[in-house]
Image (cartoon, grey):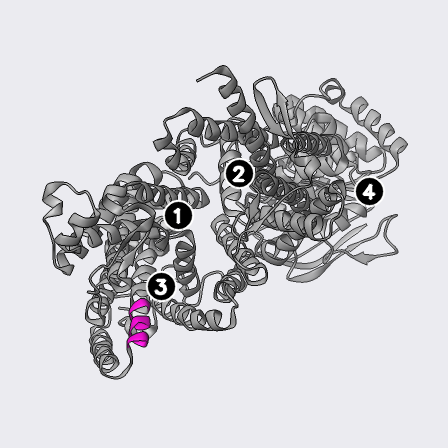
Amino acid sequence: MAAPSNRAWHVVLLVAGGLLVLVARATVNEYILSIINFVGIYIILAVSLNITNGFTGLFSLGHPGFMAIGGYVTAVLTFPVTRKAMFLELPRWLAGLQLPLLPALLAGGLCAALTAFVVGIPVLRLKGHYLAVATMGFLIIVQVLITNWESVTRGPLGLNGLPALTTLWWVYPWVAVTVYAAWKIKFSSFGRSMLAIREDPLAAQCIGIHLFKTRVLSLAIGAFFAGVAGGLWAHLVTAITPASFSLVMAFNIVVMVVVGGTGSISGSFVAAVIFSVITEFFRPLEESFDIYGIGEILMAAVLILILIYRPTGIFGSREPRFLVAKES
Amino acid sequence: MLQIADIHVYRGKTHVLKGVRLDVRKGEIAALIGANGAGKTTLLRTISGLLRPARGKILLEGSRTAGRMDISRLAPEGITKLGVIHCPEGRGIFSQLTVRENLMIGAYLRSDKEGIAADYERVCTLFPILGSRSNQAGGSLSGGEQEMLAVGRALMGRPELLLLDEPSLGLGPIIVDTLFATLAEINAQGVTLLLVEQNAVKALLLAHRAWVLEIGRVTLSGSSRELIDDENVKKAYLGGT
Amino acid sequence: MSSGYIAQQIVNGLILGSMYALVAIGFSMIYGIIRLINFAHGEIVMIGAFTTLGLLQYLGLPFPLVALAVLIVGAVVGILIEKGAFRPMRGAPQVTGFIASLGVSIMLQNLGILFLTAQPRNFSFPDYLQRVIQVGPVSFRSIDAVIMSIALILMGALLFLVHRTKLGMAMRATAENIDVARLMGININRTIMATFAMGSALAGIAGLMWGGKFGQIDPLLGFVPGLKSFVAAVIGGVGSIPGAILGGYILGLAEVLFVGLLPPIYSAFRDAFVFSTLILILLILPNGILGKGMEERV
């Protein structure tokens, strides 16, 4: 295992990222800015799914379900009181409440993490592809519940006219926090327990790793960031509907993790950037040439090719050498 | 009949067989003895095509081959077709199939209905228990019966060379004796046998010639008489004295 | 709630169950032989539905011929998917195959959108298949009777094939132990291909039925039958063909009765009900009703 991280490079990357955000704010137009925001949200999603899926090997397709929970909680909390009264039937304490974005995001993330605990305790007893299927079931159940809980969610209509609070200065600090947290976890003893579980659950248990606790925690940590990403998403698009968080989205995030390399933070980061740029690039192309679906087809093709020819992804489980300090 | 020339086999990164050479003569019973992990099963799996050697040749000369032919690159189904039939470790009974189906699947590559029926009768005479349980699921048989089923199934393919992987494993001594007597009978009917065994005494008593395999190399070879008398073999495999 | 109403609901459940069962059989067979949850299986239902639409409505071929063609198209698509995506990654971890099948599924859906547009199309059968038949308190269309009988005939044929022929024996042997099957001289590539072909043919014909039953099709229609048939296969015990049939009918009946017998507000929760059942069964009865043990349990 690698030794502690190379702090100098991390600071350099952080400063460079900050400068890039500044430059982007000053130069490019609104449309490009929104794409850069989406890229950031996808980075959060891919890196956080990597904590669950890559580190611990829990193949979850439920990420958009946690996003949906975070997104709706955040949206309801930031929704202006006057509009709340118009559209929703909320309990009194909630109806009169309007929070700034940060506490709303934290609340959204925490709700998602809490759900992960509740769902994870029974479901995480399943392994491998059965877990994947069960988490997919979870995602669909979340969608159905949101669609039918009309007094809070307005059902299939969703909530629109949300304040457009999400900016680069919201998204990218969260990107930094997510990556930092993932990095800290990966190179801690907790992270090593996770990797041990992924490689050989039985052996991990034998050396005293608490299997179940580690699994539930890694699902919950992933879910927290997914919830935050959902909140950022809602306030970027300024609308949120049950259909926003679909199985296709789960698939896209999984593709990023698998292609980047399950377990590699840098891999997820890079793959998230590449794929979300490609998707956003194809969207106008699809619309103008009437070739809907091309982006997804390409994405799926790349996934299948990677699975056949390089099943460990681009980076494997590793991080680039220069980001990790020399082994002691 | 079978000549193994300098075979190297890797499993993952482990070099399991490091240049094994041996030859099995037509009509004999040959035995390969050695400890756990020596590579005995790997060798049989390589002969039957389940594993590919990295280097080396496996030459087969039988009535269904044109002269001598290298079978080391053939798929298992091709090798089975040539009359080399492998009774795998742990018997490999299809537990959901009936006893009869298990035997019939041994004749999968054949299409001579009458010949198959005759061989079925023959196997049921050799192992009467199989005939009386023909409609039972393979998985419901006892260990000894399953071993008989595995041997019977192999016979259904009309083997010229029969590869047997640990046939005595997990069986009581009386059953082992009956089984080995039957193996001798099968050999007397003209089937060449290559037997892999941890039960070295039994194997050496049955076989004409034998090899000792140690961590991927043949360290000793000769007639089984010679090996029984060999001091090292005695100490390592025959329980001392 | 009259007994006639309940009888009607049961018939509706059996119709839906026939379709779930046909799709679930393929799921189960494919899982049985290579331990793959083939998520792309539902997309063959979609392809079957569009093939029916093209041949029956646009080309005007007679119905029996269309049904036969749909079976063949389903089989061919199944073979292509197996060869193109799953064979190259045979031996990889099970999750890899599952994710790849999700990829194939999304690819097929979007190929459908690309070439056929996402617009739903109306699907109508000739009049003689639309006639309403009244039996006592129960009424159904002739197509519903056709759906149920085709399903029963095909299931019978499949069970015969699997249990009474040499190919079926080879399939069962391969499902149990691939290595030993090869030692018997079985060409496992061909056997696996045959399994995909048969399972996919049944899914294709289920597409014909789906279109006939619901009257409208679009490139995303495979999602729901695919997912629910998977649930059906799990209920019955993945890997078991009789289990898949049983699971299909149970799920079909349960779903229709859930909607038909409970107050209407609950009917919106039908899918949540289906998937909660799935998760519950996975947890409580992981081998399903007729299953024989499940891999990967640590």
Q: CA distance from mark 1 to mark 4?
A: 43 Å
Q: Is residue A32 magenta?
A: yes
Q: Nearer the viewer, mark 3 or mark 2?
A: 2
Q: CA distance from mark 3 to mark 2?
A: 35 Å
The answer to whether the residue labelled 1 contacts the one labelled 4, judged by CB atoms less than 8 Å apart, is: no
Q: Is residue B225 left or right of residue C259?
A: right
Q: Nearer the viewer, mark 4 or mark 3?
A: 3
Picture coordinates of residue C97 (x, y %)? 52, 51
| Residue at numbered disc 2 | C229
Mark 4 residue type: Glu
* C143 over A164 or under it: above or below: above
Question: Which numbered disc flags the more N-terminal residue, 3 or 1?
Answer: 1
Mark 1 residue type: Asp
Q: Nearer the viewer, mark 4 or mark 2?
A: 2
Q: CA distance from mark 4 to mark 3?
A: 54 Å
The answer to whether the residue labelled 3 contacts the one labelled 2, judged by CB atoms less than 8 Å apart, is: no
Mark 3 residue type: Ser
Mark 2 residue type: Ser
**Which residue is at the front of the view, C175 or C269?**
C269
Q: CA distance from mark 4 to mark 2?
A: 48 Å
| Residue at numbered disc 4 | B160
At horizontal 53% and vertical 60% (from top left) the residue drawn is: A304
| Residue at numbered disc 3 | A264
Picture coordinates of residue C6 (x, y %)? 49, 20
Mark 2 burial class by Cα count in 10 Å: few <14, some 14-19, many 20+: many
* C158 over C98 or under it: above or below: above
| Residue at numbered disc 1 | A200
Q: Chain of mark 4?
A: B
